[in-house]
Each structure stands twice: as C-alpha cells, then as structure tokens.
Image (spheres, grey):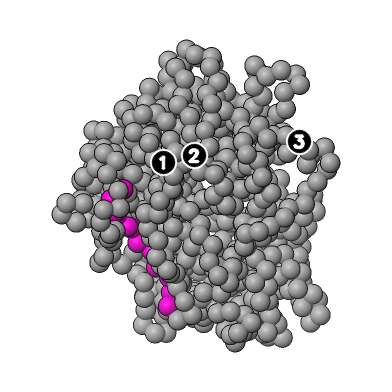
Amino acid sequence: MTRFDGPFGDLSRFLEIPRVSGLSLSPDGAALAAVVQNLSPDRKKFLSSIWRIDPDGGAPVRLTRSADGESAAAYLADGSLLFTAKRPDPQAGKDDPAPDGAGLWTLPAAGGEARLLAAPPAGVDGVAVAREAGTVVLRVGVLPQAKDLAEDARRRKARKDADVGAILHEDPKVRFWDHQLGPDTKRLFAFTPPAPESAEQPELTDVSGDIGPALDGYDVTPDGRAVVASWEAKLPSGELRADLVVIDVATGERRTLASEPGYEYAHPLVSPDGRLVIAHRFRHGDYDRCFSSSLWLLPLDGSEPGRDPLPELDLWPQVQAWSHDGAAVYFVADELGRAPIFQLDLATGTVTRLTGDHGAYAQVQVAPDGTVYALRSAVDAPARPVRLASGVADQAPILLAAPGAELELPGRLENVVATAADGQEIHARLVLPEGEGPAPLLVFIHGGPHSSWNSWTWRWNPWVLARRGYAVLLPDPALSTGYGQQFSQRGWGEWGDKPFTDLMAVTDAVVARPDIDETRTAALGGSFGGYMANWVATHTDRFKAIVSHAGLWQLELKATSDAALFFRLEFGDIMERPERWQRNSPHRHVENIRTPMLVIHGDKDYRVPVGNALWQWYDLQRHDLDAKFLYFPDENHWVLKPQNSALWYETVAAFLAHKVLGEPWQQPELL
C-alpha cells in the first residue's frame, strides 16, 4: 500500500464515497429510511436519494432515483413514504409551469410508482406529519402580497418574464449563510393525504399566513389540529426574537405559548398524547455573559409555566425525540469530545447516557417498542445508521448496513489532554498516519466557535492529509462545547486570547511526543477556525505555514454579515463600544506576520463576507508577505461542488508540501 492509494489518497475516489445525511422511522417502527448523497454521473454535483435501511441489519435498498435527486424523507401513518424532489410531474401538461423548487411526492408502502402530491410554485422546504391523523404540514415560500398559491404563481411568472431579481426588504434579515432571503417569505400549508389508490390532488390550506423570512422548526400535534412553531418577533433596533406559538390548523388562530425577553425557542416537539411540548431554549448572551442553551418543557394548553427539566445539566442539549408513551425524552449534547444520546425520564428526572463510545449522534428516532435508531459518526467514522436499546447506559451501538459504511482509514485516532496556562484541561483528538514517525503536524482549528471536533467531516477531512503522511491535531479550545458553561465563558468576547493560548498549550504537548516532528508544523482553520488561523499568523511564527479558509480578518466587517445582530451581543454595538471589535481584529497585527499563508474564500459567503479575504490579500501584498489566494467565485461559506472540493484539497496539499515538507511548488493542474 502506497501513501496515496485508496479513497483518501485519490480524491476522485474520495468524492465517490456515499454520504448518509438523514434518517426517518415509520410510525409503527417497521420501516427506516435514510437520505444518501452520491456523486452525479457528470461528477459536477452531489445527488441525494432515499434508501430503505433494514432495522435488523440486512442490506440497504435504494428506493428513489431521478436526475435531480430526492430528500426530506418522512412517513405517513399507513407506511407510505413522503419525499421532496424537483422531478417533472408525468401528469403535467406541456404548458403547465414547472415549480421553482422541489415538490412533495409519495411512494406507496406496498411499492409501485411515486406520484406528486403537492407542487407549490417556490417548492417545499419543510415537511411535518401528524402522528395519528396523518395531516401533512408543509413549509413553503410565498411572495408577500400573494393571497394564495395561484396568485403566487402568477406573480412569480411576471417577475421572471420581466427579468426582475430585485428584492424589497422590510425585515432585518437580508441573507442567511449561503442564500438570499426573499423576495418570498414562509408560510405553513396543511392537507390531508388522499388514499394511496386515489389520483386526487390534495388541496393545500394556508394555516399561518406570512411568518417572515425564516422559521426554526415546527411540529404537528398527533390529531393534526394544531401546529407548534418557532415564530420570529420583531423588536426595536432591528433585533429579532424567536417565540413559541400554537397555530390552529382549522382557523389559523395563533396564540403565544412561550415568550420572554432575552430568550429564544426553537425545534419544538409535541408529546405523543398531545399534552406537552419540549423545545430548545436559548438564552441570549450580553457583553459580559456567554449565551447558554437548555431544554424547555411546558403544557400545550399553556395552563402552567414552562420549566427546565434539566436545571443541573452543564451541557447544551438538543432535543431529538419523545418515547412512544411520552414518559421520556431523548436528546444529544456535546460532551468531552463526543456527542452521546441521553434519555430523560420525565417522572423522576433521571438521565441515562445511552452511548458510551466516542461517537457523535444525531437524527434520533424511537420506535413504539422502545428501540432507538440514530445516525452515528465520529472523527474516524462517517455517518451510519445504528440501533440501540432504551434505558441501557453506555451501550455499544449495533451498526446497520448502509451505503458507503465500510472505510479503511490510513492511520489511527488518539485522545490528547493538555493543561492551559490558567490550569484548564484542554481536550483534543490526534490523527496519526500509518508508518513510523516522527510525522509533520497540522493543527486543524474548528469553526463555530461553539462546536467540537467530535464528528466526521467531508469538507475538512483529516484522513485525506493523514494519507499524505501528516499527523492532524483537532483541538477544542475555549468557546468549544461539551466542557461546561464556564469553558465557553473563558473565551467570551476575547476570541484572540484564551482560544489562542489554549491552542498553543495543546500544540506544545503534542510536539513533545517522539512520533511528532516539531520542526515541521502548520496551522489550518475554517470560519472561526480561519479567524484563529489569522490570529495565529499575527501572534506567533512557530509554524511553517498557515491556511485560513473563510476567516475574519477585519472584525468590523462582521457587521455586514448575516449574523451581525447576534454578533453585537458578544462584542457590543460597534458604533458605541468599538474597543472589543478592534482589540480582537487580526488585521491590526499584520506587521507581525512571518509565516507563509494560503487564504481561501468563496465570493458568495454571507456568514464571513468575502471583503475579509480581499482586505487580507491587500494587506499581505502591501507588506510583501509570502502568500497565495484561492478564490471561488461560485462558492459560499463552504466549498460544496465536487470539482471545487477536489481543488481545495489539492491546493492545500500542494501548499503544505511546499512550505512544510520543502518540496517544489506544484500548482494544481486545473488552476
């Protein structure tokens, strides 16, 4: 086996690995479906399809196939599968306008051909199903002045015929991550699915009216009579707050279930008996105090105030599912470099950690018999469906067969613990390549910053570089999640202080190992990690190279990003308290840079606007520094297109080989 063989050495083969990204369980617990991404035949995009996963471990079966792919799998009570797809309707006439987005399709439980159920003009971007009644509630984009979907279609056609792309904004949010908001806003539509043998097209009923540009989660009561949703309330000074509301499906009447200054609610789930709601409760931070996250439990009828069912939990839980009898709630939370599944007994308050391995779990589904299904990934394992038992602590998951599940890794994974300057333990994962050391070291800095290196990543995959002989350090510095509220508080408002000293402490500990070459090291990061890479470059010359992807350079440019309103909670109003913005901005220290840099950015990045990279590139050139700039005009905060992803890895590998290993510079062929 040579260093560059296998899927991690050959990027064309790496891109061909199937990627599991979603999981859905039928109400009776008998059917399990997963969304799987594969490289398209022309190798220019990834396409999703729906696969049936055998709960008993048998071979997976592909259920859908089309030129544009399928996603958002959900089950009806009769076992029929719902999914969204932008495939043509075989029943449509030649003059019927095609929708701009994905329609909602159904595949009968007994098999046969899928048929189109709903095709709103803007497409469907959210699906929820009532557990008992089967009522389907869709999230759909509609132009704000359209009274119904027919008028929405006419208005869209008029805009298209006139070649109009302009958007008139009245809400504070203009962009989000990688897409423009508007000109439409979101609405919820409900319908009762026809019988599987019926050719009837269901009528969609608007149950919410205009809910603004975004909606962070909603659920339908089991009887289909109400929707519980996260609803944005406009506040003074351009602020927004997400309240929890209940919408009557028959009348559209809306009442507020939870609303409190300084708090937001998201991702509500209604209990199986329809009496309770559990949601994610997010407490805003301020200039001095880091934000926090908890669960919030309250009766659907609003007869009692809500409560935190886990007041002593020093983690940030994310609610996932109810048990079939409503006696327990399942959640996941980052914890010490992993993300286990926890089971909360509501009667006793007892919390059982179901998974004791180093995996990170998501998409938790619970069957009527208590069997738990989820997607499990880890730094050393891509996402894969697993099966667990309720109520059993620290159990080993049973792996279920899925596309692309078996991979041979080019190395091994270890845990590392170091001590920071203030005595705080700093945890990290260390990927070690095959063969004898000492190996050159790459320090990968994660984004967020409120996240953790505990799961698989396709965009920043350490095993691609391990195949090339590098050890890869994945540290969780201050502001990382899974280590308690105080750990996050350590770096609040001081991005360039505690995270930096933590990174240096864990790097010091690792380069002291005999299997690591201290003389050949580099630092890399994306998003917040890109910001930290810039801060590292301006505060130490210990590394041979620095790679900064989508990183903040001039911190005040964050005021032009999609998260500007949130960012000022931590850094203060830039017009009134600019000192923290200035103190934490890497561009103020450009004269200290001695390390060669590779800057990477996408032009359509709305989370970290591309002006950061352009300003940084100008600064680097102005100071005659050794640097390169990989610019993607057609990418956003992430690099998503397969051909661009391959170029990303090729360019990073070539830059590191040149600066860290001393090899001649070899520019990627397509650049």
- The span from disc 2 to disc 3 (Cα, nearest Å) is 24 Å
Q: Which residue is mark 1?
A: 248
Report if residue 183 is visible in the image. Answer: yes
Q: Which residue is mark 3?
A: 157
Q: Which residues are magenta?
A: 289-300
Question: Which of the 4 image quadrants contains residue 545?
Answer: bottom right
Q: Position of residue 597 (x, y in %)?
A: 70, 71
The alpha-carbon separation of the residues under discs 1 and 3 comes to 32 Å
Vertical order, 150 against 253 (above or below): above
Membership of 9 in magenta stretch: no
Q: Position of residue 97 (x, y in %)?
A: 72, 27
Q: Secondary structure at mark 1?
A: strand
Q: Which residue is mark 2?
A: 207
Amino acid type, residue under disc 3 in the picture: Lys
Name the amino acid type tagged 1: Asp
**In the structure shown, which secondary structural element does the residue marked by tag 3 occupy?**
helix
Q: How many residues crowd around disc 2 within 10 Å: few (fewer than 14), some, or many (20 or more)?
A: many
